[in-house]
Image: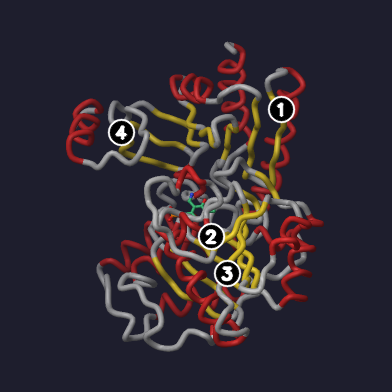
Amino acid sequence: MNNNEIVAMGKQYVMNTYGRLPMALVKGEGPWVWDAEGRKYLDLVGGLAVTSLGHAHPKVAEAVCQQVGTLLHCSNIYWIEPQVKLAKLLVENSCADKVFFCNSGAEANEGAIKLARKYAKAQLGPDKYEIITATNSFHGRTLAAITATGQTKYQKGFAPLPQGFKYVPFNDLKALADNIGPHTCAVMLEPIQGEGGVIPATQAYLEGVAKLCREKGMLMIFDEVQCGLGRTGKFLAYQHYGVEPDIITLAKALGNGFPIGAMLAKEYVAAAFQPGDHASTFGGNPLATSAALAAMDVLLNDGVMENAVDMGEYFKGQLLKLANKYSFIKEVRAMGLMLGMELTIEGKDIVARCLEQGLLINCTNGNVLRFLPPLIIAKEEIDLALEVLVQAMAKE
Ligand code: PMP
């Protein structure tokens, strides 16, 4: 099928939930993707921090092919070797002790919310259920996840929403302290807000949140769906801050494109879940966990995070140079290869011009250009992207 045929068929048959660009992608390799007309693009979106090792990573492809012909699926009423190995790997590389597997970020956050409430009611008291989240946060599209999400635009039209959520401004410790009430049992945050515009938590804030949680007996839940898994140059973003959450949620890059999510918890919290309390038919299936095991092996052992640190520094430095040149660049924010450039103007025209020139970037929150390159990106590829970006900006 050619590009127009795919787009037309999609418009007729696929539910209209996304503001899609009129192009169909058919192939990917490393940092590159190809559309149905054979045009090649440098991909600095990566499915929004999903294909962190680059497209079609050979080791992930091999693991999937090997597993698909061996055992595609069985049920979680049996043990699954790649699932238990992946759980061990995640525990050994985080502060958590136990893992629950699911299929997406929203599902991981649903699990986190349920676990936090189950734990709180049993351990802290039957009236403990409230979870405080941050304004401008994003936690996914299921009902509890949009309720946890501190942006009303995602909630509009879906009332009644689940009760027991409260929102406070991000990076504001006083606001958080002032809003802890008799029902509060947990605080849920992205260490770096992604959809909200690439906004890292400050060191003082996360330290303060951790201290407050300890003092008040509240759980600290980190949503690392976007910022976790090597993106910032460490396995998990919170590891930059020297604090330890009680619950962590992961998805996106975990399978390098294969759908899988995970909810990790400290033992004392995880123990609140008993058989029958929570489940997911496909969660932790042999295929997904084989893909993720291969992806995490590459991430941890092939120098990927070291490259993310080096290339992140380089990319950020170059973006800062652009900020000196163009007055409409308000701020550059970055940790590793999670980069955002806040503009005083809308970003969509720049994104469209980059697309025309074969560069995929994204704009979030209307005015923040977001760059989520694969962690294996090379300096020459960043230079190429910058050339296109400069041309696109020069037209402003
Ligand atoms: N949490 C964060 C921080 C995210 O960025 C996203 C997706 N953008 C989600 C949760 C939801 O993940 P999913 O789309 O896999 O449900």
Of badges 1 and 4, the one in the foreground is: 1
| Numbered mark located on residue 298 in the image | 2
| Numbered mark located on residue 139 in the image | none
Q: Taking the image as drawn, is residue 182 in sight?
A: yes
Which residue is labeled 4 in the image? 24
Element assignment for label 2? helix
Please indicate whether residue 10 sits to the left or right of residue 259 in the image: left
Disc 4: residue Cβ within 8 A of ligand 1's nearest atom: no
Q: Nearer the viewer, residue 33 or 174?
A: 174
Of badges 3 and 1, the one in the foreground is: 3
Relative to 376, say whether 110 is above or below.
Answer: below
Q: Quadrant of residue 344?
A: top right
| Numbered mark located on residue 330 in the image | 1
Amino acid on which disc 3 is placed: Glu
Residue found at the far top of this picture:
395
C-alpha separation, residue under disc 3 versus residue under disc 1: 36 Å
Amino acid on which disc 1 is placed: Lys
Which residue is labeled 3 in the image? 130
Q: Taking the image as drawn, is residue 303 in sight?
A: no
Q: Position of residue 395 (x, y in %)?
A: 57, 11
Q: Residues within 10 Å of mark 1 (few under 14, many from 20)?
A: some
C-alpha separation, residue under disc 1 versus residue under disc 4: 33 Å
Q: Quadrant of residue 175?
A: bottom right
